[in-house]
Image: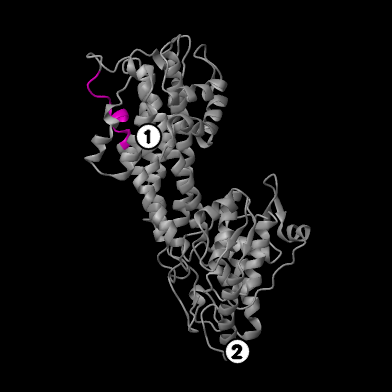
Amino acid sequence: MPDVVVQPTGVSPADVLAVARGMARVTLAPSTVEAMATSRSIVDKIESDGRPVYGVSTGFGALANTFVAPERRAELQHALIRSHAAGIGAPVSREVVRAMILLRVRSLALGHSGVRPLVAHALVDLLNHDITPWVPEHGSLGASGDLAPLAHCALVLLGEGWVLGPGGERIDGGEALRRAGLTPVELSAKEGLALINGTDGMLGMLLLAIDDAAHLFTMADVTAALSTEAMLGSDRPFLPELHAIRPHPGQAVSAANIHRLLQGSAIMDSHRDDLAHAVQDAYSIRCAPQVAGAARDTLVFVETTAARELVSVVDNPVVLPDGRVLSTGNFHGAPLGFAADFLAIAAAEVGAIAERRVDRLLDVTRSRDLPAFLSPDPGVNSGLMIAQYTAAGIVAENRRLAGPASVDSVPTSGMQEDHVSMGWAACRKLRTVLDNLTSLLAVELLAGVRGLQLRAPLTPSPAGQAALAAVGGYAGEPGPDIYLAPVLEQARATVSGRALRTEIESTTGPLN
């Protein structure tokens, strides 16, 4: 994997994914080092002039009017990191911490933070030596950005705090630096504040969620097509001319995917001209593109928001090229919190409609001659009955998680920070919703494949045949009840992975 080179214009979403999930190495462009050095020279001049400037020669938050003597300003920065590393709870995942560190490097690279290049180099060293700070899940209110999570990262630069070990255990931060041959950083004026002020944790989680959601929304089209085929549904509601008259872009994309996935099916052909066939399928089948398409359009909005944030200066205070150092509110996470909450709502509904299709597949009164609970011998065997229970419970949890975090606010810092975004919480629960969506699509994938197996000797579409081959390998053929939990775990891996999608696309062409 090629190195990710941090430019003074920032990084791309693909860069973040490469570092967070692909373990790509990171380097700083020479122009980035120059931009940071120029910014630092302004802070040095403020120091020499003795001017009172927030974060340089004063305290923080409610202590912003407290002057700090020059000889204690380095101490101030170190004390800031230690006091703000006050999170609690289980550690957030390695990929989130790596994304957060890269985005903090990006923030410093924009040349408005007034830090020495060596600080950014020290963060890069953590990434390139696979040193992942232990960042607790609770601590951030999303304003002034992700203070506590970023402080836990910065604390390791000082040779303190904890690091995630290979097995998830905690390792002393100083020991981790020593093992890697790295030296702790001695911070100067402004640098502690520049390491912790900003939206990097929120943005990192949101970028990871965007990547997951884009794939899962396509897989939702795949599982919807499998269910439609297994239930002897019609492909006519997915014709392009029906979606051209309601021009929501995402809806057209999902409809085109499902229609393409259903072609070449002997199962579909078996009832295409049957006058006794239902005139209209149920909403969960017929309206699949409308729901998944609306989720896709929501995702486009979220992608736009994240792209704007990627080129934003979110530090406070900011160093302007003309020498001014000004306070700003750009660290407030409202844009990201709103986006995460909106996407969580959309993803929850994609999962909810998938569960409704599973329920229809299992119900002998609605599944068009499939056996009860997709068991060839119902009564003695329960088939996928309890798998649908599991899906129903997950749908209920996602509905609770879809309640917006960003409408909440708890004032802090002696009412100085009297409105916070809760964006960190919004992004954390979005990732849970998407993980739950993976499970829901896994249940539908298994149910859809079981339904297609039970339509034999009729053969499904090429997409359906690919799903039969992939899932049948670990789920077997319909028969006596089996231990389902391991099968569902493998179905989750099939949904989250790319192998089945790649195999399907080899027959249908690319899915959007």
Location of the C terminus by quadrant is: top left
In percent of width and height, residue 302 lies at 40, 52
Question: In what element is the residue under mark 2?
Answer: helix
Question: In what element is the residue under mark 1?
Answer: helix
Judge from the rendering whether residue 6 lies leftward or rightward of residue 431; answer left or right: right
Region of the chain picked out in magenta, as a range: 278-289
Mark 2 Cα shell of 10 Å, populated few (<14), some (14-19), many (≥20) = few
Judge from the rendering whether residue 90 lies leftward or rightward of residue 394; answer left or right: right
Q: Earlier in the sequence, mark 1 or mark 2?
A: 2
Q: CA distance from mark 1 to mark 2?
A: 64 Å
**Which disc, if any, is residue 48?**
2
Looking at the image, the residue that sits furthest to the bottom is 49
Residue 167 versus residue 315 in the image, above or below: above
In percent of width and height, residue 220 lies at 41, 34
**Which disc, if any, is residue 257?**
1
Can residue 511 be seen here? The reply is yes
Residue 271 versus residue 263 in the image, above or below: above
**Which disc, if any, is residue 49?**
none
Residue 363 versus residue 303 in the image, above or below: above
Amino acid tagged 2: Ser
Residue pictured at 40% horizontal, 42% vertical: 347
